[in-house]
Amino acid sequence: MNIILFGPPGAGKGTQSKRLVQSRGWVQLSTGDMLRDARKAGTELGNRVAGIMDRGELVSDEIVIALINERLPEAEAAGGAIFDGFPRTVPQAEALDRLLAERSSPIAKVVRLVVDQDELVARVEKRAAEEGRADDTVDAFKVRLKAYNDQTAPLIPFYTGQNKLVDVDGMGSMDEVSARINAALDA
Ligand code: AMP
């Protein structure tokens, strides 16, 4: 089963994806992690996206679509993909639909983690202290939130139109949120 974990920066997509990998054996496909890996490895792609990521802006659709496409066979072999931080624009979502249609394994559900804005800020500040991500600064976070509202939020009507969107309360402990996600997936 292929699912998307959807929500603004700091909503808990990465944490909850990792839990689903453990419990369901699916593959987590996080374009943010792939881009951070490319930077760490010092590849040409990594160098090209570094400034864009640190400012909190989105990298081009072309780049992330290619990264996802490379990993689809692995997800198929595992029996499912958890898309985390992808798609982030309508053209990305349309490309994903096309790629998955070619493999006859469409998105089953889009789980939207709903979290208050104050809580998002608190979580990103905590992550900044723990992980030292360059884009967890106050300024970069504002840009990321704006990118979410302008470019990513239009995916809510997109997936509502496909009858795939399920809202899950993302407030509370990790265990509480995991339980709600599992209930939504099994419903
Ligand atoms: P994330 O870890 O998902 O918050 O992603 C970190 C950064 O990587 C984002 O702020 C963007 O600069 C870039 N990025 C990750 N995924 C995407 C995507 N699907 N589309 C465009 N940029 C992305």
Image (spheres, grey):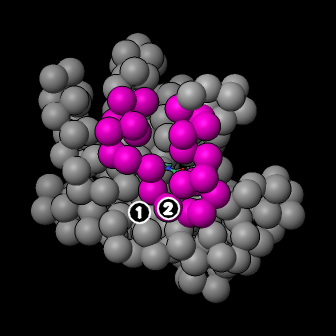
Q: Quadrant of residue 96?
A: top left
Q: In the rendered structure, which amino acid carries the disc numbered 1?
A: Arg
Q: Start and end of the magenta stretch?
A: 45-67
Q: Quadrant of the N terminus?
A: top left
Q: Secondary structure at mark 2?
A: loop
Q: Residue furthest right?
A: 129
Give coordinates of residue 82: x percent, y percent. 45, 39
Residue identified by numbered label 2: 57
Q: Disc 2, ligand 1: is the CB inside 8 Å?
A: yes
Q: In the rendered structure, which amino acid carries the disc numbered 2?
A: Glu
Q: Is residue 54 left or right of residue 180?
A: right
Give coordinates of residue 53: x percent, y percent. 58, 54
Question: Residue 112 got which mark?
Answer: 1
**Magenta span has 54?**
yes
Instruction: State how many labels appear.
Output: 2
Residue found at x 65% / y 50%: 15
Above or below, 168 against 4 in this view is below
Residue found at x 79% / y 63%: 128
**Magenta span has 178?**
no
Give coordinates of residue 173: x percent, y percent. 70, 66
Q: Residues within 10 Å of mark 2 (few under 14, many from 20)?
A: some
Question: Residue 166 got which mark?
Answer: none
